[in-house]
């Protein structure tokens, strides 16, 4: 056998037996790959050796984290809001039985906010506003306009607090703690002695009636009240003539024969006027019972022009508005005259 065949045979037998003395060791392919792979702790990039550490060296212990800085005084101010936010919007959903009290609390808070700042329900206790509003009707009152500084206009139906002993003959119904609580949060309609009437005159108006069924006039303009007065009622059987002070209202009920309104208190301390600050809000909607549901628009008769005498500054404003164009025309004529004289060299 020649030398080449012996060499091949030796190479093939290295996998099955150890190499003898003087024989070369030929590794298997899988063994060579395993021998060439980095061992644990031998390479800087291995998990056992931190970055920058030499092979075989033990890693240095890491420094402890610094304690958090103490909160400043202003951070404690919004800490309650953060706690409420985290409770309201947790990272993990909570069971419904845990969420239920929270949902009820949120509902009560929202009801109180809506009742205080947006709309409020009232019950009609008497027939002074028939037949626009019947006894035990529920109405919604717009309170948001008050916060925006909007004052009632003629024809609006307003709910207002007693300006001074208007309810002596009508004692307020007593309430227990439970009903007071529900009323405070807006779940029951208000019935705490507030009054509801229609605005006839505002500050600066002159309101008058000759009595005996004569029409009511505002700044000399008669009102056409057939559309909302109670059937068979006349505008006023009692004569009166008043000038409404600034920031006050003159109010009357639609059921004139039974309404104890501004006319009945004209000789009292209030003079029959209601301060604008006593107005709770403007009634905008009838919500109960269902067959009475509807809006409470301003009657068309109040869309007439009453502003000429109503606004104390109306005359000066009108005079100024007329004076401006006259002054402009005169100035232009003077400028043209001056230019013509300059052109002639005079």
Image (tube, rainbow, N blue to C red):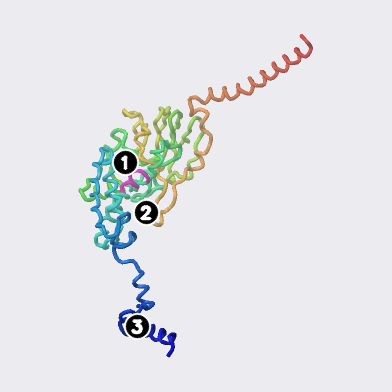
Instruction: Say which label, 3 or 1, has the lower sequence index.
Output: 3
Q: Is residue 60 above or below residue 275?
A: below
The span picked out in magenta is: 111-118
Tell me the quadrant of the picture where the N terminus can be found: bottom left
Gap in Å between the C-alphas at discs 1 and 2?
19 Å
| Residue where numbered disc 3 is placed | 15
Q: Which mark is residue 288?
A: 2
Instruction: Say which label, 3 or 2, has the lower sequence index.
Output: 3
Instruction: Say which label, 1 or 2, has the lower sequence index.
Output: 1
Gap in Å between the C-alphas at discs 3 and 2?
100 Å
Q: Which mark is residue 167?
A: none
Tell me the quadrant of the picture where the C terminus can be found: top right
Q: Residue at x 37, y 84 (%)?
A: 10
Q: Magenta part mainly helix, strand or loop?
A: helix
Q: Is residue 114 magenta?
A: yes
Q: Secondary structure at mark 1?
A: loop
Query: Which of the 4 quarters of the picture holds residue 128?
Result: top left
- Give whichever of 280, 339 is nearer the camera: 339
- Give whichever of 281, 27 is nearer the camera: 27
| Residue where numbered disc 1 is placed | 194
Q: Secondary structure at mark 2?
A: strand
């Amino acid at each position: 056998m020649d030398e080449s065949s012996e060499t091949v045979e030796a190479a093939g037998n290295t996998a099955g037996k150890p190499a003898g003395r003087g024989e070369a060791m030929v590794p298997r392919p899988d063994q060579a790959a395993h021998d060439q792979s980095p061992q644990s702790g031998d390479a800087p990039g291995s998990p056992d050796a931190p970055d920058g550490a030499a092979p075989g060296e033990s890693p240095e212990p890491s420094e402890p984290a610094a304690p958090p800085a103490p909160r400043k005084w202003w951070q404690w101010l919004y800490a309650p809001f953060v706690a409420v936010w985290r409770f309201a919007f947790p990272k993990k959903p909570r069971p419904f039985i845990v969420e239920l009290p929270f949902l009820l609390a949120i509902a009560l808070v929202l009801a109180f906010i809506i009742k205080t700042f947006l709309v409020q329900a009232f019950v009609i206790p008497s027939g002074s506003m028939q037949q626009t509003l019947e006894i035990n009707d529920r109405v919604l009152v717009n309170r948001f306009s008050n916060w925006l500084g909007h004052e009632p206009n003629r024809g609006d139906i307003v709910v207002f607090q007693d300006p001074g002993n208007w309810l002596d003959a009508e004692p307020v119904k007593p309430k227990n703690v439970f009903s007071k609580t529900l009323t405070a949060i807006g779940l029951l309609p208000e019935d705490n002695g507030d009054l509801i009437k229609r605005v006839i005159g505002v500050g600066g108006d002159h309101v008058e009636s000759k009595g005996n069924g004569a029409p009511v006039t505002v700044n000399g303009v008669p009102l056409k009240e057939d559309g909302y007065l109670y059937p068979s009622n006349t505008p006023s059987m009692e004569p009166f003539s008043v000038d409404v002070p600034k920031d006050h209202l003159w109010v009357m009920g639609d059921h004139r024969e039974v309404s104890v309104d501004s006319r009945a208190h004209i000789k009292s301390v209030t003079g029959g006027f209601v301060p604008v600050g006593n107005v709770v809000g403007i009634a905008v909607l009838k919500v109960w019972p269902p067959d009475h549901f509807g809006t409470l628009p301003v009657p068309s008769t109040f869309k007439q022009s009453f502003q000429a005498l109503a606004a104390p500054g109306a005359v000066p404003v009108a005079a100024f508005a007329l004076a401006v164009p006259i002054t402009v025309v005169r100035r232009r004529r003077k400028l043209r005259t001056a230019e013509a004289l300059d052109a002639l060299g005079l």
